């Protein structure tokens, strides 16, 4: 009976838009370019694409199969599909993980609000160039302003969530994802016309295979998971809002293609600009907040208005893409509280907001007043990122693939993947997908996991 009351996404495109909204985010614009920059450009991208096809796609499908089969939140799904077992307790991990991620994610989301305001004030044009890079360290170490921005970011996610799956998540992603593509296309076209841009293009397309080592492989695989929102129940919960007659393979493939296209477009846009301004590509996590404003300042010397406008478009893109991802991360907790704890949606959203806001504030303060507080040598922000991206996401992804590969009945998995044997193409590739989910994914994740622990 409860199922009849659950909301559903309204059609194939809406599903792909919502999932792409979750997938496309800081991972594409912030993490992907800087990782590519640190790990040799094209060589990294090559491994990233291979990992996305052979590892991330099967895990995506495993999560989607659990979600749609059960039409429930992460905890409820395990209880429904494996009643009376310990799986549901393990699933609690995958409910905590997205909440930890969203706590620090929204701090970075907050930075992008601040940088949007800075670009609206045309500050990159008026600040002396040598001060631009230090501006970032100065800002994040302040106690108040970053918290105000973090609150604004998380609050906006909460407002969208309160509106529900259809009128909140679906509506917001339906208009924002196409706009994001238009924006990134404008930025990309502009950056390709910058002097010296071709050097950046070359860096992104000419792989130097000798650069591929275990570190590059691990970074590329981890990024592929992160970018597709895998391992923490986001895809599971979104798939639980997908109706029985939709094709999961199409939703998964559609999402992955959009996500990949976006990452590549953002990567090219950032790298060409970075090369054109003579900045080093391997600047690390500060790449878009330190190096890009420097690029905007360099552009402003010859074309101040264009530079100002492009910087505004760029930070709007980051902010909007981060919002749709933040929403998807919070939805995992909200769905759990609504369905398992019988809370009203508004109350559940507020509860999730309150918890993640508090942890987020501490993460933000860990760049300034609380910098002395260390966990295994890491600041709280670094620790939250590390424990979620290297640890909880890997465990979650392994858990989901083991569940589908070993716990669920093969006939049920087949039924869900092929819509009862009616989807011809899915029937044909079932064996390969099942093999990847049952053996390859858990094995490879096990390796990532161990090395994440050891590195
Ligand atoms: N994929 C998003 C990005 O690229 C972030 C995100 C949303 C995420 N949901 C997730 C990351 C779940 C890991 C797990 O920015």
Image (tube, rainbow, N blue to C red):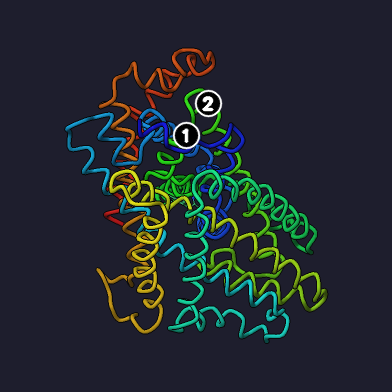
User: Where is 38 relative to 238, above or below?
Assistant: below
Earlier residue among tags 1 and 2: 1
x, y percent for residue 319:
59, 62
Query: Disc 1 to disc 2, how far (Cα)?
Result: 17 Å
Residue marked by disc 2: 246
Q: Nearer the viewer, residue 219 or 68?
A: 68
At a point 49% along the width and 14% down the height, the residue shown is 428
Q: Where does the C terminus fall, quadrant-wise?
A: bottom left
The answer to whether the residue bearing label 2 lies less than 8 angstroms from the nearest atom of ligand 1 is no
x, y percent for residue 340:
29, 44
x, y percent for residue 343:
33, 51
Crowd around label 1: few <14 · some 14–19 · many ≥20 (10 Å): many
At a point 42% along the width and 36% down the height, the residue shown is 5
Q: Nearer the viewer, residue 401 or 338?
A: 338
User: Where is 296 relative to 438, above or below?
Assistant: below
77 relative position to 261: left or right? left
Residue 57: give its label. 1
Q: Where does the N terminus fall, quadrant-wise?
A: top left
Indicate the secondary structure of the residue bearing disc 2.
Answer: loop
At a point 33% along the width and 41% down the height, the residue shown is 74
At a point 31% along the width and 47% down the height, the residue shown is 342
């Amino acid at each position: 009976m409860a199922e009849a009351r659950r909301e559903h996404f309204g059609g194939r495109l809406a599903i792909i838009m919502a999932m792409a909204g979750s997938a496309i985010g800081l991972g594409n614009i912030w993490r992907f370019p800087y990782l590519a920059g640190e790990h040799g450009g094209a060589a990294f991208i090559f491994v990233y694409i291979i990992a996305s096809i052979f590892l991330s796609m099967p895990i995506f499908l495993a999560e989607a199969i659990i979600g749609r089969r059960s039409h429930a939140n992460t905890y409820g799904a395990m209880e429904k599909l494996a009643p009376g077992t310990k799986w549901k307790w393990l699933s609690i991990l995958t409910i905590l993980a997205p909440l930890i991620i969203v706590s620090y994610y929204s701090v970075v989301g907050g930075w992008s609000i601040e940088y949007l305001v800075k670009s609206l004030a045309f500050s990159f044009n008026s600040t002396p160039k040598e001060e631009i890079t230090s501006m970032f360290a100065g800002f994040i170490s302040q106690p108040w302003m970053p918290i105000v921005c973090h609150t604004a970011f998380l609050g906006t996610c909460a407002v969208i969530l309160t509106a529900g799956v259809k009128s909140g998540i679906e509506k917001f992603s339906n208009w924002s994802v196409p706009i994001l593509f238009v924006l990134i296309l404008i930025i990309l076209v502009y950056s390709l016309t910058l002097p010296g841009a071709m050097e950046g293009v070359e860096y992104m397309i000419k792989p130097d295979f000798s650069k591929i080592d275990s570190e590059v492989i691990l970074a590329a695989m981890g990024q592929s998971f992160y970018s597709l929102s895998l391992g923490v129940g986001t895809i599971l919960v979104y798939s639980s809002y997908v109706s029985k007659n939709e094709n999961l393979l199409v939703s998964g493939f559609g999402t992955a293609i959009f996500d990949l296209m976006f990452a590549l477009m953002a990567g090219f846009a950032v790298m060409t600009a970075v090369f054109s301004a003579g900045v080093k590509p391997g600047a690390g996590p500060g790449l878009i907040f330190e190096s890009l404003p420097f690029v905007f300042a360099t552009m402003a010397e010859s074309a101040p208005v264009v530079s100002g406008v492009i910087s505004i478009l760029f930070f709007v893109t980051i902010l909007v893409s981060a919002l749709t991802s933040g929403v998807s991360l919070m939805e995992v907790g909200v769905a759990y509280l609504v369905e398992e704890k019988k809370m009203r949606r508004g109350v559940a959203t507020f509860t999730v907001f309150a918890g993640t806001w508090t942890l987020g504030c501490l993460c933000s303060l860990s760049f300034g007043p609380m910098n002395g507080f260390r966990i295994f040598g890491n600041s709280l922000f670094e620790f939250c990122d590390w424990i979620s991206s290297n640890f909880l996401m890997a465990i979650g992804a392994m858990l989901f693939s083991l569940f589908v590969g070993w716990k669920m009945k093969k006939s049920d998995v087949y039924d869900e993947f092929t819509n009862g044997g009616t989807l011809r193409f899915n029937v044909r590739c079932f064996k390969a997908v099942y093999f990847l989910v049952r053996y390859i994914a858990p094995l490879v994740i096990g390796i990532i996991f161990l090395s994440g622990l050891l590195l």
